[in-house]
Image (cartoon, rainbow, N blue to C red):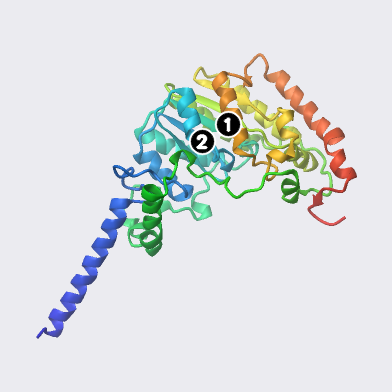
Amino acid sequence: MNTPKQFIIKILTSILALLVICALVVVIFDPFYHYHGPLPGMTPVLTEKEYQCVGTLRNFEYQGLIVGSSVAENNNNSWYEQDFGCDTVLKAIRSYGATADLCYLLDVAFEEHSPEYVFYSIDTTSLSASPEPTYATTGSPLYLYDHNPFNDYTYLWNKDVLFKKVPYMIVQSVFADYDDNLSYNWEEGKIFSEAAMLSHYARPSTITPMKREDEYADNLAANIKLLTDQVENHPDTNFKFFFPAYSMLFWDSAYRGGDSDAYLYNEKTAIEALLEYDNVEIYYFKNNEEITTNLDNYMDTLHFTSDINHYMEQQMAAGEDRVTKDNVDEIFKSMHDYVDKIESEYVKYYEDNDMFVYDVAF
């Protein structure tokens, strides 16, 4: 018969053994790739960027990175692997797309890797955003980002990880034939159409006076420095920056909010700074009127179908739509003209047919 002391010891030993087993299961399968890459014979299952992105950048092998916000998530990694000769391309994604956040991910990648290519999607508003990382202020799982093993308990003894994430990873990898080239892809189930897009656009009901071009000068300068520091610090990496094809209604909103001149100034200033580097190429797609005026390509003012992602990738692979010192002035003159054309021509049909939903009632 056990004494009370022996009984307590057995209970504590059993609890400890159970905790060790739980931790071992998480460490071995590691659904967030915090400790290692995918197990042999298992396809990486990448569906939760906030939890998995940092781990994959540290623990996977890769030659190229697709860097950007949710606008870049629907890229198929294999397009870049095939067209740019990379064995493996990964995504470094942050939904907000702020420059500081994306440069943080690049810093993580460059800790132990030297990718040959970085395909960096620059969002217009990222150039005027705060140049400070937002991970700590937005509830990101920092225990997966740092190098402190003593806060890993949040990961190791987490019932959702143990009973949901690990089984999901096994099923998707072994039985569901998951395609890791579609990492973080959100396109399935989304509706891309003029009607759907307009339903997600709350048009500003008033027109704000146009702000100065240098309205965001301080943040712009700081964000440009973040980008140029990456380029300077990694001269052997080819940086291909590109400005994705937002819909014309992004510019309608920017115009009515008084921001369009400042946004274009920010883009041009950033491009001119980046063009000073030999390991940089820049591509610009915002002036493609065939794409950006066709609202059936979009689900909202920013997010487009994967066909548009593929089009931009193919144009970059072919060296088309490239910005140079010789054509940058012409491109941005045409962009100012395009914004004027949006307001004077393209939106008139939607106004005349009362197709806009406004942010407040008149």
Residue farthest top in this picture: 326
Say whether residue 230 is visible.
no
Say whether residue 152 is visible.
yes
Residue at x-position 53% and y-position 53%: 138
Q: Secondary structure at mark 2?
A: loop
Residue 100 is situated, as x and y percent measured from the top left of the image, at 53, 40
Upstream in sequence: badge 2 or badge 1: 2
Instruction: Say which mark, if any, is on residue 3.
Output: none
Against 351, residue 336 (above or below) is above
- Give the side of residue 293 with respect to residue 144, left or right: right
- Residue 322's quadrant in the figure? top right
As shown in the figure, which amino acid type bears the numbered disc 2?
Asn
Q: In this figure, which residue is indicated by the disc labeled 1?
A: 310
Q: Nearer the viewer, residue 181 or 232?
A: 181
Q: CA distance from mark 2 to mark 1?
A: 8 Å
Q: Secondary structure at mark 1?
A: helix
Residue at x-position 50% and y-position 34%: 66
Cβ atoms under marks 2 and 1 closer than 8 Å:
yes
Q: In this figure, which residue is indicated by the disc labeled 2?
A: 76
As shown in the figure, which amino acid type bears the numbered disc 1?
His
Specify few, some or many for label 1: CA neighbours under 10 Å numbering under 14, 14-19, or 20 or more: some
- Give the side of residue 238 with respect to residue 39, left or right: right
